Image (cartoon, rainbow, N blue to C red):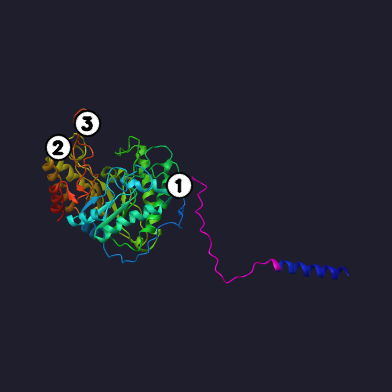
C-alpha cells in the first residue's frame, strides 16, 4: 500500500513540474540591449569595447578602398587647411561647443569655398571628452558624432582628403585623471589613457568605415604631452620624458589596435601617429617608436608632426618679423631630419599644423610660405595650415603689439582668403 501511495505521489509531482514548464512560442524573443559593464579593476587595461553599442553611430556605406601607397597618398594631399577652434573647442559641452571659441557654425558653403580655392586636404580637429554621455563606458553622444560625420561627408563629396583626430583630449594636469577625462602620457595615467583611446577610436571607426576610402585619414592624438610640467613642449631626455615616450608608444598602439579591430576598410585605413607634443624634436629621438601594424599591412602608418618653425618668426610675440637666411637654414635642417629618420625608412610624414602668426609683415610671411611649402614638397611632405580665425594683429593693455595666435587665413563667412598672396604662395609651391 505504501508503495502504491509513493508511486501516486511521484506521478502527481511529475505532472505539477510539467505544468510549470514555460510554453514554447514561435514568436522571436528580442533581448533588451545590455549596457556595457564598467571595468572593475582600474589597474588593468584589456582590449574590450565598453561603450553603449546600441546608440553608437554605425557606418552603412560601401566604397572600394583604393590601391594606393602612403607616399602616393601624401603626394596627392598637397595643400591643406585646419578647421581650427571649432569641433576641437571645449568652451562648453553639448552641440554649442562648436561655436564656443568664437568661430561660426560650419556650413557646406565654407567647405565648398575651400575646395574651390584649391585646397586639397582638410584637417578637422575634434575633441571628444566633453561629448561623452557616460564616463564609465566612454560612450560618445550620437548627436555629436552625427554632426562630425555630416561635415566630413561634405568635404569627401567635394573630393577633399580629410583628417579627423582626438584633439583637445590631452588632460591638462599631471595628476591622476578621473575616468573618461581623456589621455595623458605617463605611467600614472597609462591604463586610463588606453581605455579612453580604445573606446573613443572604437566608436569613431564604427561610424567611419566601409563608407569611406583612402580620402579619410585617422590621426590618433593631437600633441600628446606632459601638460603642466617642464617637459610639456620640449623633450630633454630626463626620466619623465622617457616615461612619457614609452607610454605614448603604447597609446599609439592602442588607438591603432582599436581602429584595425573594427574590420572592413579600417584594416587598410591610413593612420597618423604623433610623437610627444607632435614635435620634430621628440620624433627624432630613439625613444619614439611607430606602432606595429597588423599582418599584411605595410606603409599605412604616417608620422604626424607640427612645426611652427622657426619659432621666433612663426609663433613668438614679438619675436622676429623678417624672414632671414638663418631661418631658411633652420627649415632645411627640419626637413632633412624628418626625411632621414622617417621618409627614407618607409614612413610618410604629414605636417598637420604650421603657419606664421600675423606680425604686420605680409611680404615676409609670403616668402616664408613659399620657402616652407616648397621644401616640404621636395621631401614629399604635405602641410596643413593651422587656422584659428584670428587674422588681425592686436595690442596689449600697455599698447604693445600682440602677435600671438594670429593664425587666421580663411574668411569662413564670405568664403574668401584674408591674404590671397599667402594662398597663392602655398598653391604655387606645392605644384
**Which contiguous range is marked in magenta?**
19-43
Please identify the dominant SS of the magenta region: loop
Give the Cα distance between marks 2 and 3.
18 Å
Residue nearest the viewer, comparing 228 with 403: 403
Is 405 on the left-hand or right-hand side of 15? left
Lower position in the chain sequence, tag 2 or tag 3: 2
> Residue 40: x, y in percent?
52, 47
Other-residue count near label 1 (Cα within 10 Å), few / some / many at <14 / 14–19 / ≥20? some
Give the Cα distance between marks 1 and 2.
46 Å
| Nearest to viewer (mark 1 / mark 2) | 1
Q: Secondary structure at mark 2?
A: loop
Say which quadrant the N terminus sits in.
bottom right
| Nearest to viewer (mark 2 / mark 3) | 3
Name the residue tied to disc 1.
Answer: 135
Residue nearest the viewer, comparing 425 with 247: 425
> Residue 414: x, y in percent?
20, 50
Say which quadrant the C terminus sits in.
bottom left
Name the residue tied to disc 2.
Answer: 321
| Residue visible at 14% across and 37% down in the picture | 321
Residue nearest the viewer, comparing 276 with 22: 22
Name the residue tied to disc 3.
Answer: 396
Residue nearest the viewer, comparing 428 with 398: 398
Please identify the quarter of the rendering in which residue 93 is found. Answer: top left
Q: Secondary structure at mark 1?
A: loop
Residue that sits furthest to the right in the current view: 1
Is 336 on the left-hand or right-hand side of 18? left
Lower position in the chain sequence, tag 1 or tag 2: 1
Contact between labelled residues 2 and 1, with CB atoms less than 8 Å apart: no
Q: Is residue 84 above or below residue 67?
A: above
> Residue 311: x, y in percent?
21, 39
Amino acid at each position: 500500500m505504501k508503495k502504491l501511495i509513493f508511486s501516486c505521489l511521484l506521478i502527481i509531482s511529475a505532472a505539477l513540474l510539467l505544468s510549470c514548464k514555460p510554453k514554447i512560442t514561435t514568436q522571436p524573443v528580442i533581448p533588451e540591449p545590455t549596457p556595457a559593464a564598467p571595468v572593475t579593476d582600474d589597474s588593468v587595461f584589456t582590449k574590450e569595447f565598453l561603450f553603449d553599442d546600441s546608440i553608437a553611430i554605425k557606418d552603412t556605406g560601401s566604397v572600394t578602398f583604393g590601391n594606393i601607397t602612403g607616399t602616393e597618398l601624401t603626394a596627392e594631399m598637397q595643400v591643406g587647411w585646419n578647421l581650427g577652434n571649432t569641433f576641437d573647442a571645449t568652451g562648453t559641452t553639448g552641440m554649442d561647443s562648436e561655436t564656443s571659441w568664437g568661430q561660426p557654425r560650419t556650413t557646406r558653403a565654407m567647405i565648398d569655398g575651400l575646395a574651390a580655392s584649391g585646397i586639397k586636404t582638410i584637417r578637422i580637429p575634434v575633441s571628444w571628452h566633453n561629448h561623452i554621455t557616460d564616463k564609465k563606458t566612454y560612450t560618445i553622444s550620437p548627436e555629436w558624432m552625427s554632426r562630425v560625420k555630416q561635415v566630413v561627408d561634405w568635404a569627401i563629396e567635394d573630393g577633399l582628403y580629410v583628417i579627423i583626430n582626438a584633439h583637445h583630449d590631452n588632460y591638462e594636469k599631471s595628476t591622476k585623471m578621473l575616468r573618461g577625462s581623456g589621455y595623458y602620457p605617463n605611467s600614472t595615467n597609462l591604463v586610463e589613457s588606453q581605455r579612453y583611446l580604445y573606446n573613443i577610436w572604437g566608436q569613431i571607426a564604427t561610424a567611419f568605415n566601409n563608407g569611406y576610402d583612402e580620402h579619410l585619414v585617422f590621426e590618433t592624438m593631437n600633441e600628446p604631452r606632459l601638460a603642466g610640467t617642464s617637459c610639456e613642449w620640449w623633450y630633454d631626455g630626463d626620466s619623465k620624458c622617457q616615461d612619457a615616450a614609452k607610454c605614448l608608444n603604447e597609446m599609439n598602439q592602442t588607438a591603432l589596435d582599436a581602429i584595425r579591430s573594427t574590420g572592413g576598410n579600417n584594416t587598410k585605413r591610413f593612420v597618423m601617429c604623433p610623437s610627444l607634443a607632435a614635435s620634430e624634436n621628440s620624433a627624432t629621438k630613439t625613444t619614439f617608436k611607430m606602432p606595429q601594424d597588423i599582418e599584411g599591412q605595410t606603409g599605412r602608418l604616417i608620422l604626424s608632426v607640427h612645426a611652427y618653425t622657426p619659432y621666433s618668426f612663426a609663433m613668438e610675440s614679438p619675436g622676429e618679423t623678417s624672414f632671414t637666411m638663418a631661418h631658411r637654414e633652420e627649415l632645411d635642417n627640419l626637413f632633412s631630419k624628418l626625411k632621414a629618420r622617417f621618409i627614407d625608412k618607409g614612413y610618410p610624414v604629414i605636417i598637420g599644423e604650421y603657419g606664421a602668426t600675423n606680425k604686420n609683415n605680409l611680404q615676409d610671411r609670403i616668402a616664408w610660405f613659399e620657402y616652407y611649402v616648397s621644401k616640404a614638397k621636395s621631401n614629399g611632405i604635405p602641410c596643413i595650415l593651422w587656422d584659428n580665425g584670428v587674422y588681425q594683429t592686436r595690442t596689449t593693455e600697455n599698447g604693445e603689439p600682440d602677435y600671438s595666435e594670429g593664425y587666421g587665413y580663411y574668411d569662413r563667412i564670405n568664403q574668401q582668403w584674408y591674404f590671397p598672396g599667402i594662398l597663392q604662395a602655398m598653391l604655387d609651391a606645392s605644384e
